[in-house]
Amino acid sequence: MSTIQTLSRHASTEWRPDSGGSYSGRYCTERMEVLSTEAVMNRDSDDADSKETNLTVSLVYCDVVLAELQRKGIALPNPEDIRRNLLCHPDMTDLVKRICDDALDRFPRPSQVALELYQDPEIEDEHLTVYVRQYDYDDDILDVLDEVRLKFHEERATSSNWIHITTDFELPI
């Protein structure tokens, strides 16, 4: 049995294991192989090709960043969906980390910063969203969110997927 798990996504299906142990889903057209955590720990680096190594690095880095964000207090209500999205768009991982860190600096507790995967119910579109939620909303919250958006505008515009920074005016989760 292979220790490599193949991930692929095709339009109009949800992520689910297929008969071969692969995962299929929507919104991403590339196919990638990602080593399981156990395989990363047990593998011999001499037999790894560069593609496998790059994907392993993406997987490990993604997991480290998500764990760090959670440790810092970022709410991740759907971490597997976020992880899947970041593995399809590995260039986004560092950008997501920096945006969340900046939002935390600008909105300390009791404000809540949450990273979620938004899935449009009307069209096939998904993107990461950083939500800032407060119990009592500051009058200038939209201005401060605009500052965060502007700070990362160029990187957001040139990345492989979109990340939105906003509030939904809900209470923290």
Image (cartoon, rainbow, N blue to C red):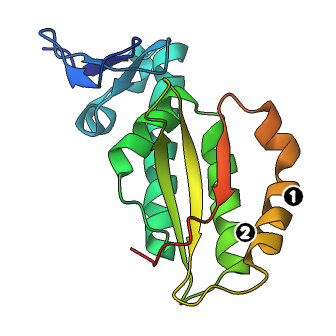
Side of 57 relative to 24 (left or right) = right
Dot placed on the residue nearer the N-terminal end, 2 or 1: 2
Are the two marked residues, 2 and 1, in contact with CB atoms closer than 8 angstroms?
Answer: yes
**What amino acid is labelled 1 in the image?**
Lys
Vertical comparison of 57 with 54: above or below: below
Q: Where residue 111 sits in the image (x, y, percent)?
A: 56, 83
**What amino acid is labelled 2 in the image?**
Asp
Q: Write the residue at 53% across / 28% down.
A: 125
Q: Where residue 133 sits in the image (x, y, percent)?
A: 55, 75
- Who is closer to the viewer here, 21 or 173? 173
Q: Residues within 10 Å of mark 1 (few under 14, many from 20)?
A: few
Q: Secondary structure at mark 1?
A: helix
- Who is closer to the viewer here, 143 or 43? 143
* Label placed on residue 151: 1
Q: Quadrant of residue 50?
A: top right
- Who is closer to the viewer here, 106 or 34? 106
Q: Where residue 71 sits in the image (x, y, percent)?
A: 45, 72
Q: Where residue 19 sits in the image (x, y, percent)?
A: 11, 9
Vertical comparison of 110 with 124: above or below: below
In this rendering, the count of numbered labels is 2
* Label placed on residue 102: 2
